[in-house]
Amino acid sequence: MITVHFVHGERSYLPELTAYQAHIERLGHAVQMHTQAHTVPGDARAVWWICGRVPSDQARRLKGAVQVHEYASASVAPLAWLKDRIKQWQHPVPDFRVFQSEWVRQRMGFGGNAPGAVPYALRDMGVPEAFLTAQALQLPEFDLVYLGEMSRLLHFVPLLQTLGQAGLSLLLVGDVPLALQQRLATLGHIQSTGRVPQDQVPAQLLRARAGLNLMPDVLPLSEQTSTKMLEYLALGLPVISNPYAWAQRTALAHAGRVQLLDVHATAAQWQAAVQGLPPHQTDRQHLQSLRWSQQLQNLPVWPALLGAAA
């Protein structure tokens, strides 16, 4: 048995870490999480960096370990391109790389396939298995529910006001930052739960008729997976989203379950969209490919990372 040491920043929501831990423990190995690289023991045999920045001195200190660099997203503005190039140029060379998608790999500047290039795999976001079996225990209390990063809603305050004009109620699941609280103070149609444990998220989302996905239509956000939309779909909720590249592709892949509505849509258009929602899906067996276990089981990184102790 070996221990895989994950090094990540103190971001608030990294569901992939829970999935990785469960998968590695099922394989008979152990996991430790670190928010600071210096806490990884010098004799570690496997280190998985969630990038972020990988300090060269710490990578050298851990040179006896198999090292994986994971890029779950590309850098965001300001200076996004420069940030990505700095990571490409300054990060030490790992034994393996993992990218959320081919788009992220290309964006990060690792698109070459020259002889001797670092092996890599693509790993999309997933959902816990419980999302595919959870069922609503009562009729929905809200028209819409929004899960996840709340600060992005500051881009959509006029849209949130339009929802109130349309007579639609909205539940926010997660911490609402102070700046957004101040903007929502006069909007009585919006309620929030605060932070909830992941195992309680399905019950909260199922309090609504549909999931709301809002993403600024800017790179890299417009090309990256919206975990919240996958979670809505896995729970059987229909989804209303603003149109952008990834959402448009997902709407095609889940025909009839994702409705795209412009951010400048009127109150009447929102009313019509909600009235036209398809019913909740109780049987989601056809969505098994969304499971985290499905996303992780075929990653080619495991023999390199764990093979020596298999």
Image (tube, rainbow, N blue to C red):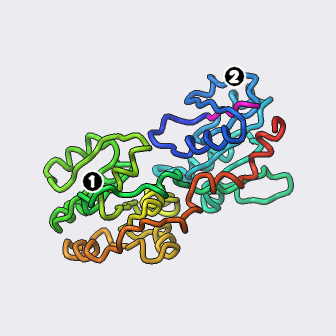
Residue 291 sits inside the magenta stretch: no
Residue 17: give x, y in percent of width and height. Answer: 57, 41
Decide: is 6 above or below 301.
Answer: above
Amino acid type indicated by mark 1? Leu
Residue drawn at point x = 75 percent, y = 42 percent: 93
Asked which secondary structure carries label 1, the reply is strand
Q: In the displayed image of the protein, which residue is found farthest to the front?
A: 137
From the viewer's perspective, tell me whether residue 263 is left or right of residue 222: left
Comparing 267 with 82, the one in front is: 267
Amino acid type indicated by mark 2? Pro
Q: What are the residue bounds of the magenta stretch?
A: 1-6
If you read the primary sequence from the N terminus, does the residue marked by circle 1 or circle 2 appear first? 2
Residue 274: give x, y in percent of width and height. Answer: 27, 71
Q: Quadrant of residue 209?
A: bottom left
Q: Which residue is label 1 attached to?
A: 171
The residue carrying pointer 2 sits among few (fewer than 14), some (14 to 19) or many (20 or more) residues within 10 Å by Cα, namely: few
Q: Main SS of the magenta segment? A: strand
Residue 26: give x, y in percent of width and height. Answer: 67, 41
Answer yes or no: is residue 82 visible.
Answer: yes
Badge number at residue 104: none
Name the quadrant of the N terminus. top right
Residue drawn at point x = 23 percent, y = 57 percent: 141
Comparing 141 with 83, the one in front is: 141
Answer yes or no: is residue 90 visible.
Answer: no
Badge number at residue 41: 2
The answer for how far apart the CA atoms under marks 1 and 2 are is: 43 Å
Name the quadrant of the C terminus. top right
